[in-house]
Image (cartoon, rainbow, N blue to C red):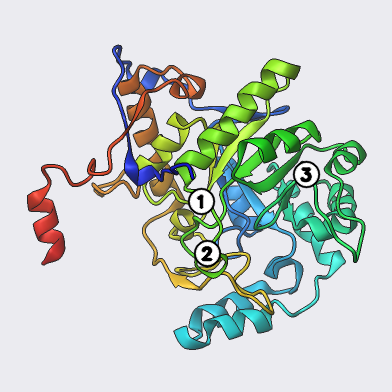
């Protein structure tokens, strides 16, 4: 067995040259799209609705809408979201299973996409692989700019007796928009997916704050190791073909230090869920749940209370009086890049990392004492 590492076990070594944080570049490119910040909002109903997707666009990032979620099942999702938020803890999973038993309505898919596009926003939608062949043409016809094919674990080779599995090379060739796939945690799987023609890979199995896949199924790879392995596949692939496939770390980022470490591990962008679910504008009303939480037979997640911790602008850009790294994520990233001497995100890929499990506790006896009181 090889050792896997989480972000908590690593530290970034400052560079030999430092740089003014105001002179670093944090933009992120995926195919023909350029985002001024490397942050995507996760395709979870507690995080992204058309309003939040448009707001993320205004902030320079991207909000991915779940095309199999509440917005595609209910004409008026606000009342359903209120019902979920009001459910008692011991009934929340049953409530979610009931809510998501409502069929997906194809007319709502077009309405939600056109709503986002009418605001001048880039539109990205998430679909599970089993529904990709049916729903992605509808999404493209409505004007989506990007398809995200997403499941607990995604591979280029899926074996099934019941149906002909999704062939990513065929999906990519049939659509005029870039395809991003997830989720993946290994070098070889990432490399195979890149060779299918995708433009981005979401990295992470089970690290999300509301996900219990690791507890239920026992599978997963710590995010630092998973990001490094998939980034190594990207570097190998770009040398082979000249085509750059984005690596997007999805999950496991609790605060700004984790976000900074993701880029040092090789990420091109991050996908955030629980952190953004704390925004005042998030549709979850202070609650957060994963895409697998309402599974009818084997739920792998829980509704968790994350509270409200400020506006989306505060969480991304500040200003903040918080000293725990939960707001001004972009400011923290720029400061970290400056201390590492990195001019851009690609420069952060070359930052030195060390294994340092005590990095957050060394010398912090007063802070730890107060936390224990």
Specify the quadrant that holds the C terminus: bottom left
Q: Residues within 10 Å of mark 2 (few under 14, many from 20)?
A: many
The mark found on residue 251 in the picture is 1
Question: Which residue is rendered at x = 47% and y = 22% of the image?
Answer: 25
Q: Which residue is mark 3?
A: 156
Q: What is the residue that sits farthest to the top in this orientation?
A: 17
Q: CA distance from mark 2 to mark 3?
A: 23 Å
Mark 3 secondary-structure assignment:
loop
Q: Residues within 10 Å of mark 1 (few under 14, many from 20)?
A: many
Q: Which residue is mark 2?
A: 211
Q: Residues at badges 1 and 3 in contact (C-beta under 8 Å)?
A: no
Q: CA distance from mark 1 to mark 2?
A: 9 Å
Q: CA distance from mark 1 to mark 3?
A: 21 Å
Mark 1 secondary-structure assignment:
loop
In-front residue for pair 109/44? 44
Up-down relation of residue 2 to residue 368 (above or below): above
Q: Residues at badges 1 and 2 in contact (C-beta under 8 Å)?
A: yes
């Amino acid at each position: 067995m090889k050792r896997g590492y989480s972000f908590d076990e690593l530290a970034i070594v400052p560079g030999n040259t430092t740089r003014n944080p105001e002179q670093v570049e944090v933009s992120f490119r995926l195919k023909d799209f350029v985002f001024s910040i490397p942050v995507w909002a996760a395709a979870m109903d507690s995080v992204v609705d058309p309003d939040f997707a448009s707001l993320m666009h205004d902030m320079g990032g991207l909000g991915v809408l779940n095309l199999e979620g509440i917005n595609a099942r209910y004409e008026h999702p606000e009342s359903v979201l209120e019902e979920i938020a009001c459910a008692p803890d011991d009934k929340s999973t049953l409530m979610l299973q009931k809510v998501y038993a409502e069929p997906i309505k194809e007319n709502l898919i077009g309405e939600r996409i056109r709503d986002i596009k009418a605001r001048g926003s880039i539109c990205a939608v998430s679909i599970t692989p089993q529904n990709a062949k049916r729903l992605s043409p509808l999404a493209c016809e409505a004007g989506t700019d990007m398809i995200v094919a997403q499941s607990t674990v995604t591979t280029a080779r899926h074996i099934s007796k019941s149906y002909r599995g999704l062939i990513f090379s065929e999906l990519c060739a049939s659509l005029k928009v870039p395809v991003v796939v997830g989720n993946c945690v290994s070098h070889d799987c990432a490399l195979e997916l890149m060779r299918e023609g995708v433009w981005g890979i979401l990295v992470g199995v089970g690290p999300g704050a509301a996900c219990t896949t690791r507890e239920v199924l026992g599978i997963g790879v710590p995010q630092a190791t998973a990001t490094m392995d998939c980034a190594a596949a990207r570097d190998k692939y770009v040398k082979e073909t000249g085509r750059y496939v984005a690596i997007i770390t999805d999950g496991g980022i609790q605060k700004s230090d984790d976000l900074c470490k993701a880029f040092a591990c090789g990420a091109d962008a991050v996908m955030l869920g629980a952190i953004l679910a704390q925004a005042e504008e998030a549709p979850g009303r202070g609650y957060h749940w994963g895409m697998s939480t309402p599974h009818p037979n084997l739920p792998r997640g829980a509704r968790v209370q994350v509270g409200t911790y400020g506006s989306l602008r505060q969480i991304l850009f500040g200003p903040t009086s918080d000293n725990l790294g939960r707001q001004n994520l972009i400011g923290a990233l720029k400061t970290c890049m400056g201390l590492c001497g990195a001019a851009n995100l690609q420069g952060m890929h070359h930052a030195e990392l060390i294994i340092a499990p005590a990095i957050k506790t060394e010398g912090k006896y007063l802070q730890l004492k107060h936390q224990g009181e």
